[in-house]
Image (cartoon, grey):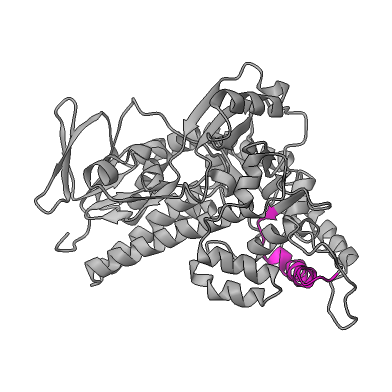
Amino acid sequence: MNAVTPLEKIVIVGGGTAGWMAVSLMQAAWPQAAISLVESEDIGVIGVGEGSTPYLRNFFRQLNIPESEWMPACHATFKCGIHFPNWSSKQGFEAYFHPFFSQLDLKTGNAFMQNACIRRRGGDVPAHPDDFWVSRYLAAQNKSPIPSVPLSFEPDYGYHFDSGLLGQFLKARALALGVSHQVATIDRVIQCNNGAIESIVTTIGDIIAGDFFVDCTGFAGLLVNKTLQVPFESYRDYLGNDRAVAIAGKIDGDKPLPSHTESEALSCGWAWKIPLAQRYGNGYVYDSKYLSETEAETELRDHIGPSCEGMPARHLKLRVGRIEQHWCKNVLAVGLSQGFIEPLEATALMLIQYTLDRFIYSYERLLAGGDVAQTRDNFNDKVNANFDGIKDYIVAHYRLNSRTDSDYWIDNRNNKNISPRLQNILDAWDQGLDFEATLTQFKGELSYLRPSWYCLLAGMGRFPEKLQAVTPDEPVAALDDVRNYCEAMANKFPSHRKYLQVIYAEHTERVSVTN
């Protein structure tokens, strides 16, 4: 784009969650623009993950969509964090919980990080993260992250949801607000002399022109990969998992409803278990070098048990990595077309949302007089840094595993492919260096805040084998006081199922009033 003017005609190619999230945010930012979405009925939705980070709450707040409107429509539940069983074989650290932390955890969270630093230097003090975070207590008691009594601050939380239903919900909302929608298969792409996209042509001859295009065509990357040929940077050397199998499971409505994701290590990868209002979402992410599709499905069915009997399995091939330019010429890549990182920390929608939010912000800067090339380069650098920061955090899970029961886990632990940044973080922890200074050094490059790194390293039991008593002058947090506080706070929250019934009842009431 030579002259920067407000976008008048935006064409989004591809639907699914990525496409309809793009429509929603761009429609809210630029209501004067004519936005159209073209999707093929031949391409199914991948949807390997059904969980989110707390960042998704901002998406619905930006659009002024209450939880009581979208959650029932998507069979959604609340999420306090992620439980990681069997990643470690170290006694007392066989599992840990990665919480969503907030002001609720200020005192106990700092106490945990204080104890963890003492223990990594050899001090015999309690430093398992599960003892120090209120959201772990909520998850252990199947409670909602929404308090039943007023607090002076808002706890943080994420969601579980049916990703297919979320796309349908956003689609219906966008169509009601006037977005143009067409079901068609793209036959070819027409480019301008400068290489930018001029229009797309469907198999029935329709020509759809636009001044800006959003590529939501999944792993195919019709515009960014096949047309603009933006280079792809593979993460395969860092993260070997390239396959997934997903199977739904029945859920017992009479039992307490979990409010966390389960990410349990299996023989050659890990299995997710996500509680929705009407079913469980189950899946197995694994490396095809160690396991065949048949073996993976068999292992997953054995792991799930009777609740998945008769349920079909979906086998998925994963392209792990990212493209180098997410905004190239007049095309923005969003979703799987821009990259993919396995859903271990449920970051897929976060990356979609971040890309869209950052693009809207960047384009507004251009309209205010910014330089095109500089703004676009800065945008691509920011998105790439987010991808690479998430990659480092995911890689750390595999490097820190202490399992010895399969070549898969041993090979992942010994994988020499690691970024210098992650190596510095691990070295600082292991060598008793100033860990806070190291995290601060890389602050602008990390996608995860300091509590997450402490929870991961301490949760995996990355401590010296031999411990010694600490000196009297070292400030050690008293575990009994911490536990008493966390239990007292957890008592202020209702059961997950009970609170969800309130949300769903509000939805039923709204629908009946509307009708």
Query: Which residue is located at x 52 percent, y 26 percent?
Result: 314
Can you say whether 295 is above or below 435 in the image? above
Q: Is residue 227 magenta?
A: no
User: Where is residue 394 shown, x and y percent of the image?
Assistant: 57, 52
Nearest the camera: 85 or 425?
425
- Left or right: 130 with respect to 451? right
Quadrant in the rendering for residue 11: top left
Q: Is residue 117 magenta?
A: yes
**Residue 361 shows up from this direction:** no
User: Where is residue 349 shown, x and y percent of the image?
Assistant: 48, 47
- Left or right: 468 with respect to 458? right
- Left or right: 67 with respect to 456? left
Nearest the camera: 185 or 290?
290
Query: Which residue is located at x 58 percent, y 34 percent?
Result: 290
**Residue 10 shows up from this direction:** yes
Q: Quadrant of the N terminus?
A: bottom left
- Left or right: 491 with respect to 187? right
| Identity of the residue furthest to the top in this view | 310
User: Where is residue 366 shown, x and y percent of the image?
Assistant: 26, 67
Query: Which residue is located at x 60 percent, y 19 percent?
Result: 311
Nearest the camera: 276 or 411?
411
Quadrant in the rendering for residue 100: bottom right
Quadrant in the rendering for residue 262: top right
Can you say whether 179 is above or below 480 in the image? above
| Identity of the residue furthest to the bottom in this view | 473
Secondary structure, magenta segment, majority class: helix
Q: Tally the marks.
A: 0
Q: Which residues are magenta?
A: 98-123
User: Where is residue 161 shown, x and y percent of the image?
Assistant: 56, 38
